[in-house]
Structure formats: C-alpha cells, structure tokens
Amino acid sequence: MPLSGELSPREGSSDFIAVDDGGFFEYQPSATAVEQRSEYPAESECIVDRQGNNYTLGPAGDGRLGLRPSLGLVDFPWLRRAWRQVQAEHPDQYPLFRRLPESDDLFLRMLFEVLQANAGGGAGWRLLLEAQDMSCGSLGEVGRALAHAKNPAAAVVADPFGHRYQPQPRQRRRLGIHTGTYLVFVEP
C-alpha cells in the first residue's frame, strides 16, 4: 500500500512515456513494457504517466527492474525543453510537428498522442493525395504512399486523433553530403 501522497505505477496508469538518458522519448503501452525494455535503473531520465506523475526504476527482485512509486508531478518546463530539443535534433525519428499547447495538461496529452501515433500500430491514418482519399494503418504506410507521389507536399495527412498535417520533405545530410530525403509532418 503506497504512503499518503504516493501513487503506485499500477494504480490508474495504463501507459507511459519514457525519456531515456540520451534524451530520446518512447511511448510504452504499460508498466510491464517500461520494465521489460529497461536494462538499468538510471536508463530513464523520466517516466511519466498520463496524469503527469513522474516515476523511476528500481530493483524489483529476481534481477528485474520495476517502477517505483511516483515522485510527484513531472517537471513540465524540463519535459517541454527536452521534447523541443529531441525533435529539433532528430526530426526523422519524431516527424510529427504540432503546435505546443500552453497548458501542461494539453501538452502532456499532445505528447502522448504524438508518441503513440509515431510508435505505429492502430489504424485511423488518412491521406488525401492527388484527389484520392486513402486509409492507412500507420505513419510508415503514409510515408511509403508519399514516397511514390509526384508532389508529396501537396498532400494532407490526418492522424488517428484528428489532427491534420502538411508533409514537408527534408534533406538528410551526413558530413555535409546529401544522403537522401525524409518527410516531416507539420500541423498548419
């Protein structure tokens, strides 16, 4: 039984966002998924649930890791800075660009939606391309359809949460050499 004010990770939390020690964000559908993907306690800088509760990892017995009781609310200014930074540095890995809400609750909701949509799975993607309205099963499927388009920037993409995006091609560079193109999706 948690102490007063502490929240156990299994009480009311169904999914999580983990920010690892390299600053990368990852959607996790359950506490078990967080625990199974983690190799050492300090691997995650932050593990947050949909209510904004911040968790850490610790020994759970049998050499496994488990989520510890909540430390309280996540540091929202830090979380916003970390999200802006990882998206600026790795837009090919975090290609959904939405306007950042001012309220912490709406920001957290947006972050869960973007990371869950980016993680794949789940139908509900729509692509309006060259006068055709297509249903897609994932963002990857949208990207593959746009790869064959004459003008991908003219398409409109809608995610499973109803947000619309304009695809924008970006050049991938390594050591100053153009090595390909990828798409980011920007909410107008």
Image: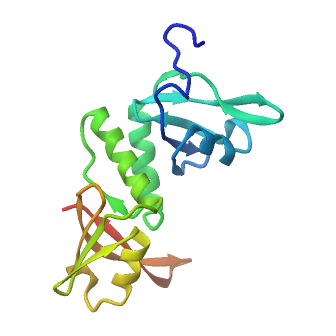
* Furthest-left residue in this view: 131
User: Could you tell me residue 154's position as x and y percent?
Assistant: 20, 81
* Furthest-top residue in this view: 4
For residue 18, which quarter of the picture?
top right
- The front one of 117 and 108 is 117
- The front one of 150 and 16 is 16
Quadrant location of the N terminus in the rendered image: top right
User: Could you tell me residue 136's position as x and y percent?
Assistant: 35, 73
For residue 94, which quarter of the picture?
bottom left
Tell me the residue at 51%/25% (across/down): 11
For residue 162, which quarter of the picture?
bottom left
* Furthest-right residue in this view: 62
Q: How many marks?
A: 0
Quadrant location of the C terminus in the rendered image: bottom left
Left or right of 3 in this view: 143: left
User: Could you tell me residue 19's position as x and y percent?
Assistant: 54, 44
User: Could you tell me residue 5's position as x and y percent?
Assistant: 49, 11
Left or right of 135 in this view: 177: right
Tell me the residue at 31%/33% (across/down): 104
Tell me the residue at 39%/46% (across/down): 112
Left or right of 56 in this view: 53: left
Residue 178 against residue 119 in the figure, above or below: below
Indicate the colouring scheme: rainbow
- The front one of 158 and 82 is 158
Residue 118 against residue 102 in the figure, above or below: below
Tell me the residue at 58%/38% (across/down): 31
